Amino acid sequence: MDSLLIKGGVPLHGDVTISGAKNSVLPIMAATLLTSEPCVIRRVPDLSDVSFMAKILTSLGAEVKLADGELRVRAKKIKPVGDYDLIRKMRGSICILGPLLGRLGHAQVSLPGGCVIGTRPIDLHLKGMRDLSATVTVDSGYVHVKAKRLKGADIFLGGRSGPTVLGTGNVMMAAVLADGVTVIESAACEPEVVDLANFLTKMGAQISGAGSPTITITGVKALHGAEHEVIPDRIEAATFAIAAAATDGEITIHGARPDHLSAVIDKLREANVSVERNGTTMKVRRNGRLKPVDITTLPYSGFPTDAQAQMMVLMTLTQGLSIISERIFESRFMHVSELARLGAEISIEGPSAIVKGGRKLSGAPIMASDLRASAALVIAGMAASGSTQVNRIYHLDRGYEKIDEKLRKLGARIKRVEET
């Protein structure tokens, strides 16, 4: 197993280009199952999650070719049963449920795995399938869904932590081939949902309202092949922007969508970080002494939970008190104990972390618990003095394309080593 060895204290400088969005490409890959015709997806990031999803599509019978950021899929003849050993490793794999049900009328998919960041039930996914007239049973670790014919319905997808992004996509993919009109209320508004809707529309689906809390889908008889380019990864862009501020560097981020990052940019500016926007480019640097800010994670367009850990690192470097409240996942403070090993002073009070910033961080061996915690610990290692070894970085490879290579090009002293 690999780890990252980081020698900190070097400001990041230079240019970095953002890859395609992990949280967009996985459901878009699943959507190719809705047609027997060829589909082409571009700006596909080189991630272990993408590789897993490609294997899942292949196991279902699809022809899959991935090279140089371009994915070609033809699901001419597919089966309704997903491979347990593949699906259990990645939570995003549940998004094959909707396409299989929509196209074949039945599906059997194992309950998925993923990061350990709290309970992430799929009850809203299953509620949506039931509302579309499917019968749903869960038995021996498998979800079984079946319908003679899906029927459009009014579906409410609000959960206790807000709308479900994957659930919205899953229900939308099932509904595009249902009879009649489906209206999803309390739909997730994330850019990744819009990206999926745009791809489905290119395939011939009739969808309106994506990006708002109400999405309307008018079912069609069949979908055809399409070509699509995935949107830039807003969380990767946020991570690099925060890394520039944490290391007191100056970087230019290319190929981003600043309009997808308004909440992050707002908090960075409040922390006295300069963010200059120019089309798809952002230049990021400190604007003097950092200032403490309070943050509450919320569904889009609020501050993203996927950037919470990274922002916490920045606050540990900021003189003063910051309060970071996590409203999406109840177990997303697992990085706090590892930051403490580097010298950070953070206490947990219910759903909030109180950060007493300004103490110097010093390198130490640390262990990543999930994808975004991994990115946060890498940032902390670059900001700390001495050497830091981040172990269990397989999480990092799930969501960041060659992050160590990109950081080295920005001047970071970071290398991949075999974990000891």
Image (cartoon, rainbow, N blue to C red):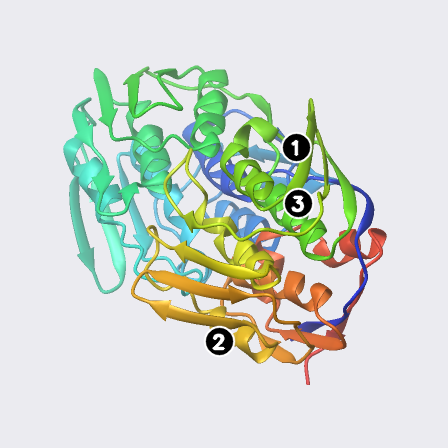
Q: Quadrant of the N terminus?
A: bottom right
Task: State yes or no: discs 3 and 2 in contact (Cβ < 8 Å).
Answer: no
Q: Which residue is mark 1?
A: 256
Question: Residue 419, relative to residue 187: is it above or below?
Answer: below
Task: Please name the residue that numbered disc 3 is placed on.
Answer: 241
Crowd around label 2: few <14 · some 14–19 · many ≥20 (10 Å)? some
**Secondary structure beneath disc 1?**
loop
Q: Which residue was labeled with disc 2? A: 337
Residue 129, x across and y down, in percent: 21, 37
Q: Real-space Cα distance between discs 3 and 2? A: 24 Å
218 or 277: nearer the viewer: 277
Category of crowding for the residue at label 1, using alpha-carbon neighbours closer than 10 angstroms: few (below 14), some (14–19), many (at least 20): many
Say which of 12 and 166 sits in front: 12
Q: Is residue 84 above or below residue 249?
A: below
Kindly give the residue lying farthest to the bottom in the view shown: 420
Is 336 situated above or below 274? below
What amino acid is labelled 3 in the image? Ala
N-term-proximal mark, 1 vs 2: 1
- The residue mark sitting in front, 1 or 2, is 2
Residue 227 at x, y percent in the picture: 59, 22
Rendered residue at 22%/48% (across/down): 123
Q: Say which residue appears at 47% left-offset and 33% top-offset.
A: 192
Q: Is residue 64 left or right of residue 118?
A: right
Q: CA distance from mark 1 to mark 2?
A: 32 Å
Q: Is residue 192 visible?
A: yes
